[in-house]
Amino acid sequence: MEDVNKLVATVDSNIEQMVRMAILHVIQLGTKHGVFKVLSKEPTYPEVVDSLEIPNRALLREFINTLKAIGVVEEHEGRLKLNGFSYTLKVPQEHYDSLLPGWVSTLEEIYRMVDYALITPTHPHVLMDFDKDADFWDIRMTTDFAELYRKVISIVAGIGQGSSVLDLGCGSAAPGYFGKLVGYNGFYTGVDYSSAILEIARSRVEAKNLPVDLKELDVRLIRPVNEYDVAVISYLLEYLKPEEYGRVLGRTLEALKPGGRLVILEPFRENFKHIEALEFFEKLNKDFVGFPSRESIVRAIEEKGFDVSVEPLGRSILKVTLMP
């Protein structure tokens, strides 16, 4: 078996590189659209918006908030001021062989979408809707990075032949992957609220006759009737408000057998400096709220009163075990 710690570190290294590239593209956007030129005059928010011929003013405000969050701009007495921000892109030598190419092209496509989103959020070249743009999301879910984190989840959770798995926000690719792992002596339930994404998943699992049950449902409404060895929540909590974590996590833990494992994978915001740059691009999806903190997730679990052990792995994974 591969060293799980090395695999977790590879996941973290790639998320870190995504954030670094997002910072550079934020700076590029600010330059290309004349935002920095206007900010050099120390304007107010309304003055920035009025000075730039950008129709989508809400997204422009979001962009300025991002500049504030990553330290490019500071606000003093209602005026915005560039603060001499500098950023050095460093990739440690030991990380070179862990960087995966697949996610780069999908993020580059999202970077290009911003130019169209600054015209209108409903521009046809903005491909971030789960149903309307399910094919683009499927591309994101089948990259080498997505394959890697599914592999990490399977190892951390101990998923194998005969396992029963509940996957919330399953997407289009995970059902086929986990369905094959659990085999015909196990079963897998995938939940997602996008009918279009589930159709893609369904076509794959039916072609291979896998033991997979797919449900179209908002995870905030789940009431599982079966008991599972494993529950998986990956890249889902970022679409929930923090006050909704407890309800979803509580219902998920209720579905586990004694000794069952819940594995959560998210870029926990306290572990990735300047993650707001990456969030700016993800917010082209209207449902995106923000990457959660690990602390907020642990607190939400503790408040539900379950007897669990919580084990952080790296900077982006939590393993929660329901005690027997």
Image (cartoon, rainbow, N blue to C red):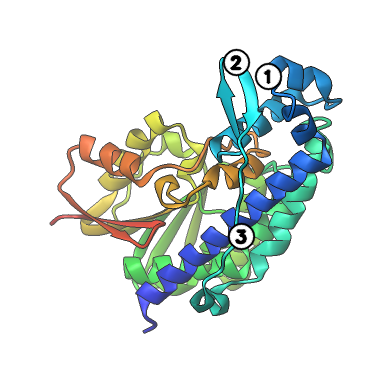
Between disc 2 and disc 1, whose residue precedes?
1
Callout 1 amino acid:
Tyr
- 3D distance between C-alphas at marks 2 and 1: 8 Å
- The residue to which callout 2 is attached is 78
- Is 156 rendered above or below residue 196? below
- At label 2, the amino acid type is Gly
Residue at image mark 1: 45
Whether residue 179 appears in this view of the structure is no
State the residue at coordinates (36%, 62%). 314
- Which SS class for mark 1? helix
Using residue 235 as the reference point, say whether residue 108 is left or right of it. right
Residue 91 falls in image quadrant: bottom right
- For residue 67, which quarter of the picture? top right
Quadrant housing the N terminus: bottom left
Q: Answer whether labels 1 and 3 touch (C-beta < 8 Å).
A: no
Tag shown at residue 141:
3
Name the residue at 84% across, 39% down.
124
Count of labels in the image: 3
Q: Earlier in the sequence, mark 1 or mark 3?
A: 1
Distance from disc 1 to disc 3, alpha carbons, whole Å, reads: 37 Å
Q: Position of residue 190 (x, y in %)?
A: 48, 53
Could you tell me if the residues under marks 2 and 1 are in contact, i.e. CB atoms within 8 Å? Answer: yes
Residue 240 visible in this rendered orientation of the protein: yes
* Point 51% across, 70% down: residue: 148
Q: Secondary structure at mark 3?
A: helix
Of residues 280 and 34, which is closer to you in this image?
Answer: 34
> Dot 2, how many residues are within 10 Å of its Cα: few (below 14), some (14-19), or many (20+)?
few
